[in-house]
Amino acid sequence: IALVDPDMMALRPVVPQLGEGMSAAPVTTDGYRDLVEYKDEHGKVLLLRQKRLPTLPSRVTKGVAAGQHFGLGGFWASSGTRNARPDFKNFNLTAVCGAKSPCLNVPPPAGDSNSEISGASSSHSYTTREYADKNYAVGPVYIASTSDWMELLPRWHDFTPRVHEQYPKLLAEMYAFTMAAADMQLKFALSSSYMVSDPNTMSTTEGWLWVDEYATRDESSIAHGTKQHPVGRALRSVCEGATPNSLPTETLRRLKNYGYGNHHDDDILDSGGALPTFLHYCQNYKFASHTFAKRKMPHDFFRCNGEPLNFDVEVLLRELDSIENNGRLSETEKKKQVRAGFMVCHLVPLMNMALADYKVDQHCDG
């Protein structure tokens, strides 16, 4: 079972397979050399994660969970220590997890074993900051077996108000989730590729590598009736071919490579490029006179006389070409702007496609 945030749109399905049948290849692109890609026997890239993490399990099953690597890390595991962040300097883990919980950050008293707490099989009876960073620094997408969810959810429910009492901020429920996972010693296999969200981040905990590669794809793979992009105009591939109701050509090519969804076109050749599983639209995305912001969406967007969102791909492409040829912009700044364009050129068509599907499902034409 996968749990996602309501502000997520799926590009491809969540699957239980992790390292099963995969081969690992280190990423050699500057800025991403701390990452490893996992490919199946056909060379299809399915997962992206940091090198320093524990060995990737074969698949999600009882006692083995997986999820999106989040930068929130294991800050809470330093609670009460001199290295704790300000919000956790005086945070009391015992008040959240209980006096003998494995989520505590100090060893149990000599002769007191916690190995039987919550039926845990691990001998790791307390949680260090490093251990939390590598096993519990998770956010949505959360993927776990039904039996693990049945054990984890009551803990999460109970821990959330206890965390919020000491940390009354937006991420309280996420920290409560990670503490609940530590309490039952349910380790998460962390990956960067389950979502992208913030175009401005340079953290490799998000799967932006695969989006950034749109601009560096192998032009020789684009053939069989599709128009090749002129040299110096590769950035436009994050939007080119998109319409108010369809995704960019390069994205369709990548979706076909995965073999998922209804995105099939005999004129589109596989490029081998990868895609994140979800778009997490928790930011405001502004690019070339287009804005996508979830809090500005009409609450009655889905209705029979609902109007699709405005989308002018030519305006977007001109802006991308301008960025491509702007020598005053740093490569990092170009990357951030192109990522914002990618989000706009996917979120707007996806919302409009969802509206069209809604109208069909509701028999709006009678």
Image (cartoon, rainbow, N blue to C red):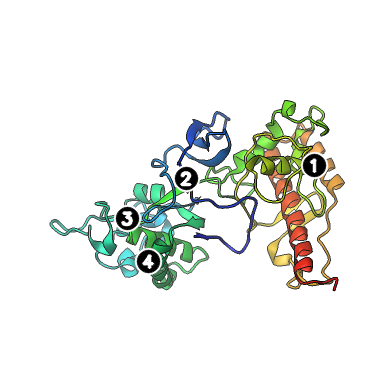
Q: Amino acid at mark 3?
A: Thr
Pointers 1 and 3 in contact (CB under 8 A)? no
Q: Report which quarter residue 332 is drawn in.
A: top right
**Residues at marks 4 and 1, CA–CA distance in whole angstroms:** 46 Å
Where residue 214 sits in the image (x, y, percent)?
69, 37
Residue matched to label 3: 81
Name which of mark 2 and mark 1 comes first in the sequence.
2
Q: Secondary structure at mark 4?
A: helix
Left-right relation of 185 to 301? left
Q: Height in image: 150 above or below 318?
A: below
Where residue 20 sits in the image (x, y, percent)?
45, 41
Q: Amino acid at mark 1?
A: Glu
Q: Secondary structure at mark 2?
A: loop
- Mark linked to residue 240: 1
Q: Height in image: 328 above or below 145?
A: above
- Foreground disc of the pair 2, 3: 2
Q: Height in image: 313 above or below 24?
A: below
